[in-house]
Image (cartoon, coloured by chain):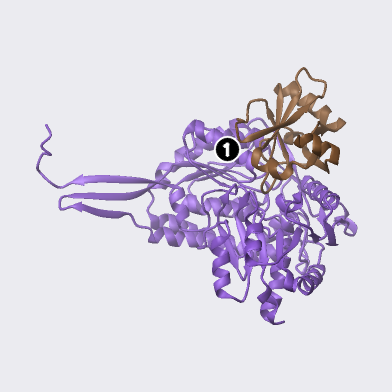
Chain colours: A purple, B brown
Amino acid sequence: MTVYAAPGQPDSLVTVASRYGHYIGGQWVDPIKGGYFENISPVNGKPFTEVGRGTEEDIEAALDAAHAAAPAWGKASATVRANILNKIADVMEAHLTEIAVAETWENGKPVRETLAADIPLAVDHFRYFAGVLRAQEGSAGELDETTVAYHFHEPLGVVGQIIPWNFPILMAVWKLAPALAAGNAVVLKPAEQTPWSILKLMELIGDLLPAGVVNVVNGFGVEAGKPLASSSRVAKVAFTGETTTGRLIMQYASQNIIPVTLELGGKSPNIFFESVADERDAFYDKALEGFTMFALNQGEVCTCPSRALVQRSIYSDFVHDAVKRVEQVKQGNPLDDTTMIGAQASNDQLEKILSYIEIGKEEGAKLLTGGERAILDGDLAEGYYVTPTVFEGDNSMRIFQEEIFGPVVSLTGFDEEADALKVANDTLYGLGAGVWTRDGAQAYRAGREIQAGRVWTNCYHLYPAGAAFGGYKQSGIGRENHKMMLDHYQQTKNLLVSYSPDALGFF
Amino acid sequence: MDRVAVTGEAAELLRSLTEAHGPLMFHQSGGCCDGSAPMCYPDGEFLLGGADVHLGDLDVGLDRAVPVWMSKAQFEYWSHTHLTIDVVPGRGAGFSLEAPHGVRFLIRSRLLTDEEYAGASS
């Protein structure tokens, strides 16, 4: 067992300055208006540093730097760009533990997740996009003997990216790696709940990139996010968040006639068919872990399997075993590598989750376990902890329809496969889903029938580069995590070339 | 029938935000991260249309009440609950106006009574 010292402590792997400015044009700069805001660690609910409170002026400065850098970066060879992405990955890997500890302190998630998932996935993401960039080719179409259509990939130019707080580094990398691979310069606005860990990352990797290719401006959404999203100087906006802000970003984009990619969350069903319980074997155990995955990252995952559907023929035993498994989830200091569930990312998130637990009770859902704020000992007493919670109810309840974004699963039973699929699809969203069965044909049928961009089949919460991730319905537009993402960050240039000396004969 | 209400603290905040930004509106969000939070904008900032439902107006002693909106699709799932807009310490994301003040609007919900529900659907 290892308990990492909190960043800023003398024996910590991670140093903390008293304040951090923006990272613009390869330099650390003060906010133009001079404002800073406190950054709180959800681990203990206390501020530990200050971060620049960006405004439109800072966004403009970042856009100036990005526009200055974009032409040369866009013309750099694929080899040059890919080599830099690989170097970024190498440096991150060499500093993996300290980045993981910083991310845990920033977000509240357990360090065993940042060590084993968040940061290794981010490293791999840079390598994946370095690889697919090297393999990307344009095309030459011989339309007739003397006419050839050449297709080239060209970068969009300067793009804006607005990052959520649930995976501050990984979600930034999901957006940065393809944008940079495709040859764009970026202005990135982290979430105001988690503005710091990405700056620690930039301390490590900033110098590997030409100045101005990546610029980070912190601040509040209305003061810094909106000027970025509505700027006529960005060629695209990428956003992960919720539906109202997603609509607002589309509205701004429509005024500038630019594309957006949006990832807006879900209410993902996790379906357990009866064959899961045919044996009490390794697969059964895996399915129980799959049920418990709603508590991964404290439930603060857009694809949190927050609706569990269990076939009635196995319901009683399976739910008994599953709840027992949930009750074994160890809650505690996120910096302890045996802790399985840490702190919610912010106080308002904590309040929101508790308010949903109340409405779940009021709607008549039955609380099978959890359902309360956890007060930890000592320094952690003011941290934002919620016990893993299982509600039993039906799909019309609000706790089945809204993304609580906490460690709360809403459980219901079903009789037939068709019933399960009907309930699974009875939602506004379609981001993720889980299907658990020993019947391959059933897995295929169900997976194809569920209206969601990702159907985990006999697994859950895997996020390997190379598997496209994105939503159906109100869950958003576009895909991440796959080479097709390069297309989301590139223009298509067609040169239509005639090799014939002869006039067409019209005039 | 009133579907929406506001706490005293949230009303106070709305009055001070109105001084700074002019007339306001709410649009209730859905989805992940800060989804399920009410977003407060200068009135007219967020384009409304046929896809939205007007839930009601909050009278907080201003010249103009603050309208509360939600997407129609989301309302299908929320129509049986009464919503009270409250405010808590925090740091909401999105472009909602209160975030720089270190607070966050939050929805508190209760089920509509049978009489309210009958009144609402008639």
The quarter holding residue A300 reads bottom right
Towards the viewer: A479 or A420? A420
Rendering coords of residue A338 (x, y %): 77, 69
At horizontal 79% and vertical 20% (from top left) the residue drawn is B62
Tell me: A129 left or right of B73: left
Category of crowding for the residue at label 1, using alpha-carbon neighbours closer than 10 angstroms: few (below 14), some (14–19), many (at least 20): many
Amino acid type assigned to the residue bearing label 1 in the image: Ile
Q: Residue furthest top?
A: B63
Rendering coords of residue A62 (x, y %): 54, 37
Rendering coords of residue A67 (x, y %): 46, 38
| Circle count | 1
The quarter holding residue A415 reads bottom right
| Secondary structure category for the residue under label 1 | helix
Tell me: A146 left or right of A427: left
Rendering coords of residue B89 (x, y %): 81, 40
Q: Quadrant of the N terminus of chain A?
A: bottom right
Towards the viewer: A330 or A118? A330
> Relative to A35, does residue A392 appear above or below in the rendering?
below
The quarter holding residue A38 reads top right
At horizontal 46% and vertical 49% (from top left) the residue drawn is A488
Towards the viewer: A56 or A271? A271
Q: Which residue is mark 1?
A: A249
Instruction: Answer yes or no: is residue A13 visible.
Output: no
At horizontal 79% and vertical 72% (from top left) the residue drawn is A316
Instruction: Answer yes or no: is residue A271 visible.
Output: yes
